[in-house]
Image: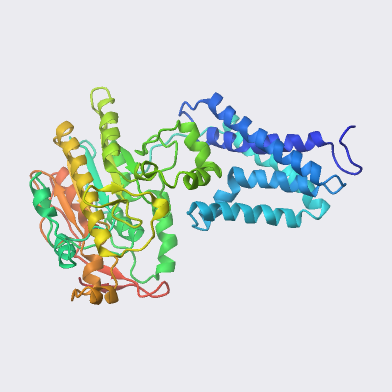
Amino acid sequence: MSGQRSGTPSHWWWLVSVGAASALPVARAIANNPGENLDVARLALWGSGFFVIGVLAFTIAWSLDRGASARARATAIAGLLVSLGYGPLLADALNLQQPLMVILVAVALTVTAGLVARWRGVQHFLLIVPLFLIAYPIAEIVVLPRPQTEGPAPTGELPSLAGIEAPNVYWFIIDGLGREDIINELGAELDLRQKFRAKGFQVDDGATAPYAWTHLSLGATLNAEYFPEDLTYDELTPVLVSFFENGPPVFRAFEHAGFETLMLPGVRWSGFTCSAGDPNCLRESSRAVEDDLMASMTLVGPIRILIEAGNSDRFIADVDPVPAVEKALGLRASDGEGTERHFVVLHVMGLHPPYRWSGPECTPQPGGVLTEEWLPLSDYFDAARCATRRTLESIDLILAQDPTAVVIVQGDHGPRVAGSDLSAIGSTLPTETVWFGTFLALRMPGCELGEGNNTVNVFRLVMACMSYRSPDVLPPKSWHFTSSDAVAHVVHP
């Protein structure tokens, strides 16, 4: 047979492997998104594109390796598998989210495959493995039904909202937004309290956060309980991952009461993501859901981000609350008679480095040209002003179309300014005060927010008010780790 070498399969066998590898992300997208009315023709077009690229890579490998070893052809197919999912998957497991790092991980995997493909057994394995990898998603589509079951009822101290005529709830988390008194002490001139109070908010002038890390602090808020204090940071991290994956009590309480949860998380909380194609994800995109799915499952996403690094709008879309609120209000309006209640989560990352807005006009900044540094403080002040400006614009939209809504605005923690940095700017504030003093405002007519709350109590207060009960709040504490191996100890900002 033409193209066949002694002791090796026909080149048609390798083309079948290329086809299986190319179909893998398409099959996975369909299997993981049942009932989402995906455009199968569009997905098939993506698969065809992957197949053409795979055949080109295979053809080049064929011309480079005409011996009986088939090493280059096996490497080409391994590289295709890596590019279509396993490279980004490993990068995600290693918590390497930067586009360049994702691509470097994929290159490293492909090079490793080429090195071990010197052995005939490995060559055959790499040529056959796509056929096995595609078997499970296809089986999941065809024969493995996904049971639709209601989540468990929430347990613990949170009041039940079942059967209560409750309004929609909008929860804004402005990442790194400290208390106004602390930010102004650092050199800013903000008037957040006045602006929020003018819109009917109560502002807690003594609010604190339980932790100085996003996933721990927001995890405690969604748990409505402090986490165990006898664990180190490294020991607590897997607890947090399991906590988010199993569904935090606050999410479960709202869902059990019939609320639909809509999310715009601007950062990947451990174990909690808002992935492309998720119908409850408030991210706006100019691309079809199928295109976003393919980008998220392959190297197309990281490469596109690198190419578009100079496009500001591409980066603002994931963190700007205004289009997210517009989408949430549009979903509410499309619920027929408006019987569907929404719990809307908006994690605004504009104030977290890399800073997304800057200057008097709040000009969007592309993430590709920025750094992960908290200082200089002038950039932080700009970001605080701009992020809260966009949040206030979002609140205007809510109050115009959903005037009875409960609206919560909080920081997850304060700005990350170290003691040496404080000394450099002439501030005498303790580092713990800066880290844990956080912004907290609440629009909830008929209820009292009070002063000196820890954000662990946010939903204890909100759900008690919505259920017409007295809140059972926890005493304010803030937990600090001196290192990843140290047990947390209580500090009092």
Does 281 appear above or below 204?
Answer: above
Quarter that holds the N terminus? top right
Residue extending furthest top?
A: 336
Q: Quarter of the image holding residue 300?
A: top right
Q: Nearer the viewer, residue 43 or 30?
A: 43
- In percent of width and height, residue 133 lies at 66, 42
Residue 339 visible: yes
Residue that appears at 81% across and 51% down: 121
Would residue 24 appear left or right of 488 to someone viewing this image? right
Would residue 244 appear left or right of 452 to someone viewing this image? right
- In percent of width and height, residue 95 lies at 49, 57
- In percent of width and height, residue 432 lies at 24, 71
Would residue 365 appear left or right of 455 to someone viewing this image? right
Would residue 31 appear left or right of 157 to someone viewing this image? right
Q: Quarter of the image holding residue 254?
A: top left
Quarter that holds the C terminus? bottom left
- In percent of width and height, residue 324 lies at 30, 38
Residue 268 visible: no
Residue that appears at 63% across and 53% down: 107
Does 473 appear above or below 274?
Answer: below
Residue that appears at 60% across and 48% down: 86
